[in-house]
Amino acid sequence: MVGAGGIGCELLKNLVLSHVGEIHIVDLDSITLSNLNRQFLFRQKDIDKSKSLTVAEAVEAFNYLNVKLVPHHGNIMDSDLFPVSWWSEFSYVFNALDNLEARRYVNQICLYLKKPLMESGTTGYDGQVQPIYPYVSECFDCQPKATPKSFPVCTIRSTPSQPVHCITWAKEFLFAQIFDETSTNDQSEADRANQRRKLESETEDKAEIENMLRENDEFNELRNIVKSKTSTKDSNFFEVLVNKIFSTDIERLLRIDSLWKSRRKPTPLRIESYTKALKELSAERSAKDIVVDETRVWSVLENLFVLQAASSALHERLASSESFISFDKDDDDTLNFVVASANIRAFIFGIELKSKFDIKQIAGNIIPAIATTNAIIAGFSCLAYLNYFNQITSSDSFHKAFSSSSTIFTSIRPNKYITSAALIEPSKKCPSCSHARGILRFSPEDLNNMTLEGLIQLIRDHYGFDDDISVILGKSKLIYDYDLEDNLQKKLTEINGFKAGETLLIQDESDALENLELYIDTNTSGKTLFPTLKLKEKQMDNDGENKDEDMPEQGEVISLDDDEVVELDEPVETRKRGKESLDGSSKKAKL
Ligand SMILES: Nc1ncnc2c1ncn2[C@@H]1O[C@H](COP(=O)(O)OP(=O)(O)OP(=O)(O)O)[C@@H](O)[C@H]1O
Ligand SMILES: [Zn+2]
């Protein structure tokens, strides 16, 4: 079971009461106060303890069927901690995760190992369980997932009109520029040129572009103050910050007439008019009294007061122990900074102010989790799994389970509280399961002595590639094709990145056979084992064009080796065969 959060707690209780033999529980996180309202296996005393260890201990209280529980504290995507040999032990995998990246990773591992996977997720009242039988039913990646909504840079930086624009500005721009890891004082020429190009793709207004670039440069002063070891009391960080972002920058925006032809103009904030009231407020109350008032919309003065306190707290942290601070909705200093600066910007632009509670939801991309939805989904997850195990008497259990399992949805819509849909076959366009996969288990001897040329020969012999092949290591590192022979005589261990947990994507240059993805495992004691797979012939459409769409898209980046990166400006398909289509660069026409 991967994830011991909202769904995980409910699911573990169900599985233990269903008498599952042995359950391994993986989670990378520790328990926070905000988990306690729905993750019922945790108590106040457990705050800061490991989720996986605590959850295993908690269910022992009702583990009267003596299910064996094995907790693991760690990131499931860490292939040193969780190698293929570890994954191979399981007969069933449950996802109870909260992010796409980890879900995708588990999905891929289950495809490699052909393990049944129960995928589950909830947002608010909406929930879904999807049983996945690799290569028989749709996998997690068969249906494209929606990407989060984003806003044009110009709206965020120059012309906000909704609270969400101000919140995005405060979190993604202001906070990141000053405190985050990516904030830097010495931006290279290339970075600047890149930034300019990006802005030019969004607006033709030259004055606006110059303004945004200048604003960026001026953040140096703020970064310098905040990163200097000057005591917070002696620094004028808050004053410089407020003057720059709420006064100087706004005045400069006002000078760009083109922006305000059909928009309401912003009004710069005069901090002088608040100085006296700020002093009085700080004599009366502490900022702590205000920040706990999460559901009331604070006044402009209160927001300034909170901003002052949050700036000083963040400055103090940077001056004492931390080298950078990332925004985290559960880190109150970062959240208060974002809430207050977003609200003051909203006031300047005549936009509605919001409560800390509302801003937290938006800035943290949160839809409140509902304990009942988690419980229902975990219940279905367990029932669907039991259904699978009641059937696996035949050798063809995936096909059998395919016809008797369903995807189940919950929602708050009347007559649609619970609905189900039959499973469907994998999509031919799926980036994950539309090609063959398997685990390539190297003996330690072969891994140390085999050359890339030797490996390529073995792959060709094993899988019947007639023509030449190309080999991509990891996400995008091309290590061999008919035109790139530099690595052929290298031992496998001499190729940067060639290690257990990485993947090799093999493509047939003649496009006759489907792509093959091999997962590198080095944990075997015997001889090197190639997975037994029969590669399918690629489907061609009537024009002889290949129907499979697994080539990188236009604009995607392929890296050739660690320091050479080529941006594709035309699809790889057309470039593969003809050097003449390249720009004659010194990249030795590797693509
Ligand atoms: N890569 C990963 N490896 C292991 N566990 C993970 C990984 N990614 C996420 N998780 C765990 O999955 C669980 C998901 O649970 P849930 O959706 O309830 O989120 P939460 O972090 O507990 O709550 P919230 O995000 O609402 O504060 C979390 O406990 C999280 O730590
Ligand atoms: Zn798929």
Image (cartoon, helix red, strand yellow):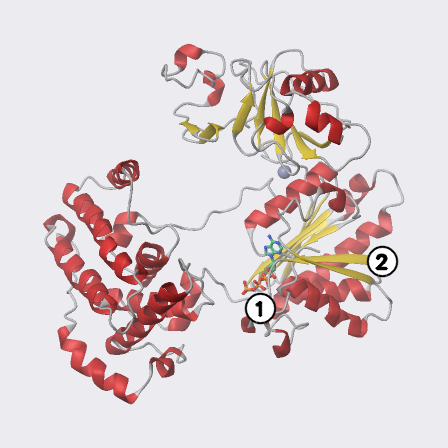
Please tell me which residue lies in front, 263 or 318: 318
Q: Is residue 442 visible?
A: no
Ligand 2 in which quarter:
top right
Please tell me which residue lies in front, 151 or 363: 363
Q: Residue at x 75, y 27 (%)?
A: 445
Residue 396 falls in image quadrant? top right
Q: Residue at x 69, y 27 (%)?
A: 448
Q: Residues within 10 Å of mark 1 (few under 14, many from 20)?
A: some
Residue 370 is tagged as 1
Would residue 60 be found to the left or right of residue 457 on screen?
A: right
Q: Residue at x 16, y 68 (%)?
A: 269
Classify mark 2: helix, strand or loop.
Answer: loop
Residue 520 falls in image quadrant? top right
Q: Determine the CA span between mark 1 and mark 2.
A: 29 Å
Q: Which residue is mark 2?
A: 21
Quarter of the figure that contains the N terminus: bottom right
Query: Which of the marked residues, 1 or 2, is nearer the chain's N terminus?
Result: 2
Would residue 160 be found to the left or right of residue 393 on screen?
A: left
Please tell me which residue lies in front, 184 or 327: 184
x and y, in percent, of residue 108 in the image:
65, 40
x and y, in percent, of residue 62 in the image:
80, 73
Q: Residue at x 64, y 65 (%)?
A: 50
- Which amino acid type is marked by label 2? Gly
